[in-house]
């Protein structure tokens, strides 16, 4: 993967048969100009689209009826002339032409398939032998015709999805599965998916056993390592902030992808909204921010575009893309390396404790970013030896393999933060012995939290929390500190009992221990990460960061504003460490669209990095401007001057 690029375009080309003159305005000169303006050195080109049409003369599929030449080969010619990396795209899970001829291949819900007369695309079940055979023939033809000219195969709209078509129902019954049990249906769907993956791999391997294969499912990387590793070569994390993913999604997905040992890229889009938005243009500052965020999270970059049916590349789009990729190109010498983490944050989704987009994962990831912590998101397979602190947010049980792993981590001197019902064993008791007994869920919602410390930004007070709270008792052998109390209301609000407009005030006398810190284990007696995701209260984040900072000897400290993101990469072969600093503020406009337009300056940022090597110089990249620094007691300190959008600070050592 030496040619794996930092500056990729994912070029959609889903084109209806109702449109004629396909590619009629394509010219090598126009395409070449677009790639140069956009600073693009990798692109995904179309062999087959969602409508089911091929964009070259195909003998196993149907070439688009409005296309009268080999568009794919013409595009490949330009890429080869410029030395641009090429992936070839095949729509796998959508093929409208095929569906209309063979409706029995539809992925089916319990109430039957989606009616064909509805506008839009229809998912295909890979358990349909006839369609899977057709798909493998198409892939075989692509590999035979273009295998020596391509650098990767991208298959779209795949992944696991429960299906109740005739083939799937028969298959489940044959294995003795209960077709009414969603877990059984999910298990069978995985078998179907693996059968599809195996068929594609065998087809590709006939021509090239090292060809990267990307199976795209909208960036759903948390489905399991076995699913993730169906991809060969690298991961592509689809994550268009304005297309439904939001700005929370990519940093979370990247923090997990970092642990999987593969290179990966972050796929955003040039669109104001999402895929297929002709005439939609994101503000250039948004793309500058998103690509800077991508490399700061350890990823390469991909920007989605959609080619007009006539094949002419839109110069405005590639000027927009170039505004971001021009900056990335200048920084490439300092990108990459080995990410330096302090914290292992367990993902409830990856652990299958909660479903996709759960609030606890979202809230804990936000705290990591806003608190400027160095972290990875992990599952039960991760080696914890390189981490200082493990966080189990809100509802992670400690049973089996994970229980033993956490106990061993503590034995080696590691520290653990629990919250909510996390840390309970099969019997409903704390699996870790830290002098605290778990009692159960509190009867009161909402309740209040009273810190014993000067909580930023408002000091000591009784702060409302709307999440579930949990009762604990401190044992006689407790050797630690109670840093916050829970204060309960007079009563829960009901028809018979209510006070004022919203909820019942606190009863100052109804207090109990809520947040404790010991040498190796801390516990917060609330679903506090979900609370932060849902309500975003500054006091909630401050309680979490107070506990973390009491337990963690941080490798990196800096005073970026809360919307700033920072990361640290070691480049051992170049004797340097690179700090990424990114700053942008998303504003909601229109009907819930997160938009980045203005990129304000940060003010000077004070930074300190623990480093046991003698520092030669600290400078900004790519400008080369040197920064004054001091180093003492294993810590190097420097100030990054006020910047907008993104900055790289480089620490060269002996």
Image: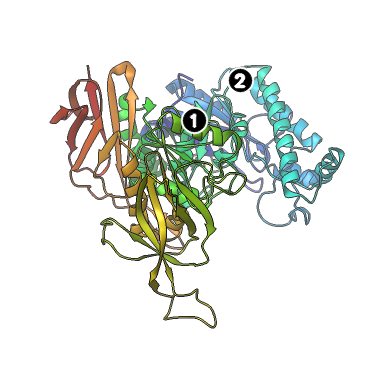
- Residue for point 56% across, 25% down: 152
**Residue 283: x %, y % from top left:** 36, 49
Number of marks: 2
The numbered mark, 2 or 1, whose residue comes first in the sequence reads 2
Picture coordinates of residue 310 (x, y %)? Answer: 54, 41
User: Can the viewer see residue 26 in this picture?
Assistant: no
Near-viewer residue (6 or 558)? 558
Q: Which quadrant: the C terminus?
A: top left
As displayed, is residue 210 above or below residue 465?
above
* 614 on left or right of 586: left
Q: Is residue 52 visible?
A: yes
Q: Secondary structure at mark 1?
A: helix
Q: CA–CA distance between discs 2 and 1? A: 48 Å
Q: Nearer the viewer, residue 209 or 434?
A: 434
Residue 525 placement: quadrant: bottom left
Colouring chosen for the image of the structure: rainbow
| Residue 333 picture quarter | top left
Q: Are the residues tagged 2 and 1 within 8 Å (C-beta)? A: no
| Of residues 548 and 610, the one drawn nearer to the viewer in this rendering | 548
Q: In the rendered structure, find residue 408 and report the number of the disc placed on it.
A: 1
Query: Residue at position x 16%, y 28% from top?
Result: 632
> Looking at the rendered structure, which numbered label has been put on residue 556?
none
Residue labelled with disc 2: 147
| Relative horizontal placement of residue 97, taking residue 290 as reference (left or right) | right
């Amino acid at each position: 993967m030496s040619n794996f690029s930092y500056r990729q375009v994912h070029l959609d080309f889903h084109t209806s048969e109702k449109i004629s003159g396909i590619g009629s305005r394509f010219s090598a000169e126009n395409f070449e100009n677009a790639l140069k303006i956009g600073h693009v050195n990798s692109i995904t080109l179309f062999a087959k689209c969602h409508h089911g049409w091929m964009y070259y003369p195909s003998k196993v599929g149907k070439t688009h009826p409005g296309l009268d030449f080999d568009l794919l080969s013409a595009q490949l010619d330009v890429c080869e002339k410029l030395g641009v990396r090429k992936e070839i795209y095949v729509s796998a899970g959508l093929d409208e032409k095929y569906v209309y001829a063979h409706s029995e291949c539809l992925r089916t819900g319990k109430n039957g398939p989606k009616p064909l007369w509805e506008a839009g695309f229809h998912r295909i079940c890979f358990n349909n032998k006839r369609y899977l055979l057709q798909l493998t023939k198409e892939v075989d033809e692509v590999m035979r015709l273009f295998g020596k000219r391509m650098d990767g195969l991208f298959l779209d709209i795949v992944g696991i999805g429960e299906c109740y078509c005739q083939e799937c129902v028969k298959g489940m019954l044959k294995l003795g599965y209960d077709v009414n049990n969603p877990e059984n249906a999910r298990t069978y769907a995985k078998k179907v998916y693996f059968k599809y993956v195996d068929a594609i791999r065998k087809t590709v391997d006939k021509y090239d056993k090292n060809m990267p294969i990307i199976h795209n499912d909208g960036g759903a990387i948390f489905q399991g390592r076995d699913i993730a590793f169906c991809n060969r070569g690298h991961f592509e994390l689809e994550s268009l902030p304005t297309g439904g993913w939001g700005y929370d999604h990519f940093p979370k997905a990247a923090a997990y992808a970092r642990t999987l040992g593969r290179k990966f890229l972050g796929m955003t889009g040039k669109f104001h909204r999402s895929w297929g938005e002709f005439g939609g243009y994101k503000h250039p500052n948004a793309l500058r921010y998103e690509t800077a965020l991508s490399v700061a999270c350890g990823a390469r970059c991909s920007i989605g575009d959609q080619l007009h049916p006539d094949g002419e590349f839109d110069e405005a789009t590639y000027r927009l893309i170039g505004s971001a990729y021009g900056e990335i190109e200048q920084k490439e010498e300092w990108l990459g390396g080995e990410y330096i983490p302090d914290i292992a944050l367990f993902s409830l989704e990856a652990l299958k404790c909660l479903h996709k987009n759960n609030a606890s994962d979202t809230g804990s990831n936000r705290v990591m970013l806003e608190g400027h912590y160095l972290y990875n998101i992990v599952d039960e397979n991760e080696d914890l030896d390189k981490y200082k602190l493990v966080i189990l947010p809100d509802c992670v049980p400690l049973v089996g393999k994970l229980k033993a792993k956490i106990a061993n981590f503590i034995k080696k001197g590691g520290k653990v933060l629990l919250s909510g019902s996390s840390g309970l064993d099969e019997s409903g008791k704390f699996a870790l012995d830290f002098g605290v007994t778990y009692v159960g869920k509190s009867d009161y919602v909402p309740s209040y939290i009273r810190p014993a410390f000067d909580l930023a930004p408002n000091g000591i007070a009784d702060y409302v929390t709307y999440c579930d709270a949990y009762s604990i008792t401190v044992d006689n052998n407790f050797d630690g500190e109670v840093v916050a109390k829970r204060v309960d209301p007079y009563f829960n609000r009901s028809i018979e009992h209510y006070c004022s407009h919203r909820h019942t005030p606190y009863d100052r006398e109804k207090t109990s221990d809520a947040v404790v810190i010991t040498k190796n284990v801390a516990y917060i007696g609330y679903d506090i990460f979900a609370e932060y995701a849902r309500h975003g209260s500054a006091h909630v984040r401050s309680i979490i960061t107070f506990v973390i900072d009491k337990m963690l000897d941080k490798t990196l400290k800096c005073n970026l504003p809360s919307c700033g993101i920072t990361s640290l990469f070691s480049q051992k072969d170049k004797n340097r460490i690179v700090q990424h600093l990114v700053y942008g503020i998303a504003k909601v406009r229109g009907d819930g669209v997160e938009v980045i337009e203005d990129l304000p300056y940060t003010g000077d940022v004070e930074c300190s990095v623990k480093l046991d090597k003698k520092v030669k110089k600290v400078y900004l990249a790519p400008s080369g401007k040197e920064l004054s620094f001091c180093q003492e007691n294993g810590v190097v300190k420097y100030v990054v001057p006020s910047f907008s959008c993104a900055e790289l600070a480089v620490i060269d050592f002996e």
